[in-house]
Image: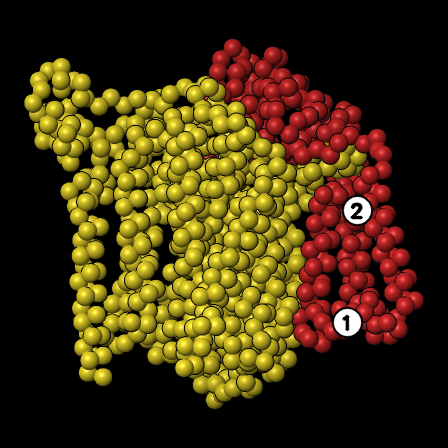
């Protein structure tokens, strides 16, 4: 035992030394040359110093020339911003039988799916692990570990597709990449090196899970998880800056020539909205995929293995809650992004929401609605875990009716597809009844209603098996106060929605804020009241984890598929509104594929990508199952 | 009788379908006299599909409900004793499938289905009166002239009633004397879905370049709107825009600049 203890201590010591050394190795290359701040991270300063013959900053070779040479030599080293080239079709490498655009599209989308998953999962894994540590409940730890296990193959696949994407871009679009690297070169190197940090954290976090499962090392393990999330988040925001620059370039002159300040190019108008939207979406997406994994395990596990079924039911439920927590604020982050798109370019905004891409947003609305329907169905089925939940069944029908009505309003299009007969009957493109449901006033009302109804379903589920006891104020009046709260909130949301039709459009957009605040206030207050009401509570009937119908698990699959499809369609939409521009209004795409595909074409290819991804997801799910299987030899050895 | 239980959700779905199919055009005809605004088939299909999904979810979330509503299908198709009803239902389902297929493939003289944007994306620049205007940054030069605002609105009204009234009507409801001669019908400016959604520069571009100036996306537009920059002066167009917003009480959309 003593020997074991000593070796464990020594192992921990080596681990610490290794971690510190690795962290230093990763951070050292940036200590001198890359200071990410608005004031310091300016390439123009670096080049200006070069041009003046001063001390070069981290460019030894060029600096040496600058110092030794006078006059002409200095001029020759002077950095001159060049506008992007005007390309012709022949400037794009043509590989027979190889469609550059389609390859880049497919590979980029697959990379983004996996990247979103592996960035999202560690966020809630870390939170779940922390809950486990604070509550002392080991089940949380086991679940968090299993979530990481599922995502491990995803890290490799994300990196592989990312590498392939980089090669494809450099091979298929060399001039475009040359322009991008001339602006973002340093951030690209930073991005690539950051992968080492990401790898370090992910492997030590995952493989060190059991080794660090003791009171002393758990904090180190949590620190590693935090490091993993910081590294992942940094990777994401760095690459987001390239995508947002392509949509809404900044830090360049009118002719597209780089002005020299990388920070100005990074911090464009769409960068932060995109960052926020992606962070939240990653959490929701990670939750939905791990929910699908739990559902897959639930439906395939031996029905007699009640403990396993209970575990995967609970795991599915937790993942589902994570996905919902991510989903609820997502529409509002999306509004901010779109608002900034409009603010940057009215033309781009109208193309996106009212023009040629409008119907993709209808598909988006349909898929979001499908997510809400699946989510509510899962929660309603969850009532079956508790016998006492029957007392709440009467609420499900009205809730369902409200959700369906809100959903129909939510996806009613503004731009209608009509036959010529229908156009004549309607009297034009504007429908007098459906028209008002096509504008944002109706959409905001509908989505807030959907969110509140879904939260109410969740609240019903939470109190299904318990009841408040005692004569306290909250125990006696909590439910009545909550009913009043919901009624007032719905009244406020609907009145604001109707009122917004009669005020100027610029003010109307602003009314979405009080609507959202109303929803948020209800959710927060309802949770606080729940907490007070059930501070003293008793179990009316036991919650039987694992007692879920199979059909409820298909709702979880539906959730994952809808999320994936949604990301593919909207990702295409975000990228394609640049239309025939590599960098919007600055660097024109003159390749043979620089056209906006028809909507069926885009939808078809996004669907194919989703199918490919889902096939790979099953591979990803299969890996941990394979790893846990013991071969005949191993089993025999263990038996002996 | 248990076998007939699925007829309950089916009846609910059918009632809702007919309520939408007949109720919405009726309501629309009251709002927009002379029309029968049906729900376009493309939208109706989605409505009915999700109503059906919603109804099924509500009816099947409990085990009892699931068994009662889905169980009869298993009974019909899996119980060897249910030969006759199985045969009848298979024939009915087959006939329904054939009818749906026939509706899709039968020859029709209708023009192809069109997706037409209500608000087409404006070009970055538009050429009118021999000048190039940047639509993104263009502002109504008369909007800030508070001193002559009333006079300009009045002058815009005169331009309107001399030129636009014939199609868009005296109350701007899109019901001028010639309104029913056009497909699509003239725009209703009072409606919150038209100029209330747009910036003045957009309206300026639409009036100035008319139907032929519409972008190529989602064509054919079939709009009979004249190219007004060939008939009116730039100032007259700005004045008529002032009048449109003043009369309808709408405010032009202001795109917030990015800070």
Residue at image x 53%, y 58%? A618
Q: Percent position (x, y) of residue A424?
A: 78, 33
Residue at image x 29%, y 62%? A204
Q: Which residue is mark 1?
A: B71
Mark earlier in primary sequence (2, 1): 2
For chain A, the rendered hue is: yellow
Q: Percent position (x, y) of residue A236?
A: 36, 48
Circles 2 and 1 on the same chain: yes
Q: Residue furthest top?
A: B130
The N terminus of chain A: image quadrant: bottom left
Question: So how many labels did they put on this image?
Answer: 2
Task: Give the Cα separation between the discs numbered 2 and 1.
Answer: 39 Å
Residue at image x 33%, y 74%? A133
The mark lying in front, picked from 2 and 1, is 1
Q: Which residue is mark 2?
A: B26
User: Dot 2: what SS?
Assistant: helix
Q: Residue furthest right?
A: B84
Q: Is residue A378 above or below residue A245?
A: below
Q: Is residue A22 above or below residue A262?
A: below
Q: Is residue A268 visible?
A: yes
Q: Nearer the viewer, residue A571 or A622?
A: A622
Q: Nearer the viewer, residue B87 or A124?
A: B87
- Mark 2: few, some, or many residues within 10 Å (few <14, many ≥20)? some
Instruction: Say whether residue A113 is left or right of residue B21.
Output: left
- Are dots 2 and 1 in contact, CB under 8 Å? no
Q: Is residue A71 above or below residue A108?
A: above
Mark 1, chain letter?
B
Instruction: Say whether residue B188 is left or right of residue B105.
Output: left
Instruction: Say whether residue A178 is left or right of residue A351.
Output: left
Mark 2, chain letter?
B
Q: Which chain did the image draw in red? A: B
Q: Is residue B200 visible?
A: no
């Amino acid at each position: 035992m003593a020997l074991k203890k000593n070796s464990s201590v020594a192992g921990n010591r080596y681990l610490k030394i290794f971690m510190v050394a690795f962290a230093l190795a990763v951070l050292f290359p940036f200590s001198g040359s890359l200071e990410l701040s608005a004031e310091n991270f300016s390439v123009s300063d670096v080049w200006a110093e070069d041009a003046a013959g001063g001390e070069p900053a981290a460019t030894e070779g060029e600096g040496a020339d600058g110092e030794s040479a006078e006059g002409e030599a200095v001029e020759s080293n002077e950095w001159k911003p060049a506008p992007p080239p005007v390309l012709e079709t022949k400037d794009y490498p043509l590989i027979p039988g190889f469609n550059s655009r389609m390859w880049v599209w497919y590979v980029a989308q697959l990379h983004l799916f996996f990247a979103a998953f592996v960035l999202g999962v560690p966020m809630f894994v870390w939170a779940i692990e922390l809950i486990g540590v604070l509550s002392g409940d080991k089940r949380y730890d086991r679940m968090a570990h299993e979530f990481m296990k599922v995502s491990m193959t995803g890290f490799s696949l994300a990196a592989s597709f990312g590498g392939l994407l980089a090669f494809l871009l450099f091979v298929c679009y060399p001039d475009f990449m040359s322009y991008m690297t001339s602006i973002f070169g340093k951030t690209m190197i930073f991005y690539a090196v950051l992968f080492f940090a990401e790898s370090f954290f992910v492997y030590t976090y995952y493989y060190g899970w059991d080794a660090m499962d003791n009171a002393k090392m758990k904090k180190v393990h949590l620190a590693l998880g935090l490091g993993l999330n910081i590294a992942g988040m940094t990777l994401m925001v760095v690459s987001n800056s390239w995508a947002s620059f392509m949509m809404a370039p900044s830090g360049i002159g009118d002719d597209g020539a780089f002005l020299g300040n990388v920070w100005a190019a990074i911090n464009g108008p769409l960068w932060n909205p995109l960052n926020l939207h992606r962070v939240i979406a990653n959490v929701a997406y990670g939750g939905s995929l791990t929910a699908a994994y739990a559902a897959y395990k639930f439906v395939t596990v031996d029905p007699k293995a009640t403990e396993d079924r209970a575990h995967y039911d609970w795991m599915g439920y937790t993942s589902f809650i994570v996905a919902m927590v991510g989903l609820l604020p997502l529409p509002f982050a999306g509004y901010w992004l779109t608002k900034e798109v409009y603010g940057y370019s009215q033309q781009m905004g109208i193309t996106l929401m009212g023009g040629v891409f409008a119907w993709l947003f209808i598909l988006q609305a349909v898929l979001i609605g499908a997510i809400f329907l699946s989510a509510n169905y899962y929660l309603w089925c969850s009532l079956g875990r508790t016998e006492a939940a029957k007392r709440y069944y009467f609420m499900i029908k009205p809730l369902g009716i409200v959700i369906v009505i809100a959903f129909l309003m939510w996806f009613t299009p503004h731009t209608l597809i009509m036959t010529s007969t229908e156009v004549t009957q309607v009297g034009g493109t504007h429908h007098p009844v459906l028209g008002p449901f096509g504008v944002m006033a109706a959409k905001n009302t509908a989505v807030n209603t959907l969110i509140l109804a879904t939260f109410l379903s969740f609240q019903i589920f939470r109190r299904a098996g318990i009841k408040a006891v005692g004569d306290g104020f909250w125990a006696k009046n909590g439910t009545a106060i909550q009913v009043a709260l919901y009624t007032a909130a719905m009244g406020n949301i609907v009145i604001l929605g109707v009122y917004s039709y009669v005020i100027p459009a610029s003010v109307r957009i602003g009314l979405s804020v009080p609507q959202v605040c109303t929803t948020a206030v209800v959710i927060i207050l309802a949770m606080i009241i729940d907490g007070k009401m059930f501070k003293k509570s008793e179990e009316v009937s036991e919650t039987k984890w694992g007692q879920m119908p199979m059909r409820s698990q298909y709702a979880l699959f539906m959730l994952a598929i809808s999320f994936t499809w949604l990301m593919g369609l909207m990702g295409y939409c975000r990228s394609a509104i640049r239309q025939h521009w590599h960098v919007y209004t600055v660097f024109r795409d003159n390749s043979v594929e620089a056209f906006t595909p028809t909507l069926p074409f885009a939808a078809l290819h996004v669907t194919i990508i989703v199918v490919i991804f889902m096939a790979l997801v099953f591979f990803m799910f299969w890996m941990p199952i394979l790893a846990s299987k013991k071969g005949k030899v191993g089993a025999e050895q263990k038996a002996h | 009788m248990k076998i007939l239980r699925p007829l309950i959700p089916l009846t609910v779905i059918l009632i809702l379908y007919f309520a939408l199919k007949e109720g919405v055009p009726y309501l629309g005809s009251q709002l927009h006299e002379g029309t029968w605004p049906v729900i376009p088939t493309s939208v109706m299909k989605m409505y009915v599909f999700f109503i059906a999904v919603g109804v099924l979810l509500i009816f099947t979330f409990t085990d009892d409900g699931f068994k009662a509503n889905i169980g009869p299908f298993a009974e019909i198709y899996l119980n060897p004793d249910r030969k006759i009803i199985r045969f009848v239902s298979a024939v009915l389902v087959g006939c329904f499938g054939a009818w749906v297929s026939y509706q899709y493939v039968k020859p029709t003289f209708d023009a192809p289905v069109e997706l037409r944007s209500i608000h087409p994306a404006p070009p970055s620049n538009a050429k009118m009166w021999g000048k190039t205007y940047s639509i993104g940054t263009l502002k109504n030069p008369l909007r800030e002239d508070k001193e002559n605002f009333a006079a300009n609105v009045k002058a815009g009204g005169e331009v309107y009633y001399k030129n636009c009234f014939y199609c868009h009507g005296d109350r701007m409801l899109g019901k001028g004397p010639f309104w029913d001669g056009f497909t699509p019908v003239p725009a209703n400016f009072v409606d919150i879905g038209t100029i209330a959604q747009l910036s003045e520069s957009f309206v300026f571009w639409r009036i100035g370049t008319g139907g032929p100036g519409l972008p190529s996306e989602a064509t054919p537009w079939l709009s009979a709107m004249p190219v007004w920059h060939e008939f009116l002066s730039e100032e007259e167009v700005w004045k008529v825009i002032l009048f449109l917003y003043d009369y309808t009480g709408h405010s032009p959309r202001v795109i917030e600049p990015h800070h």
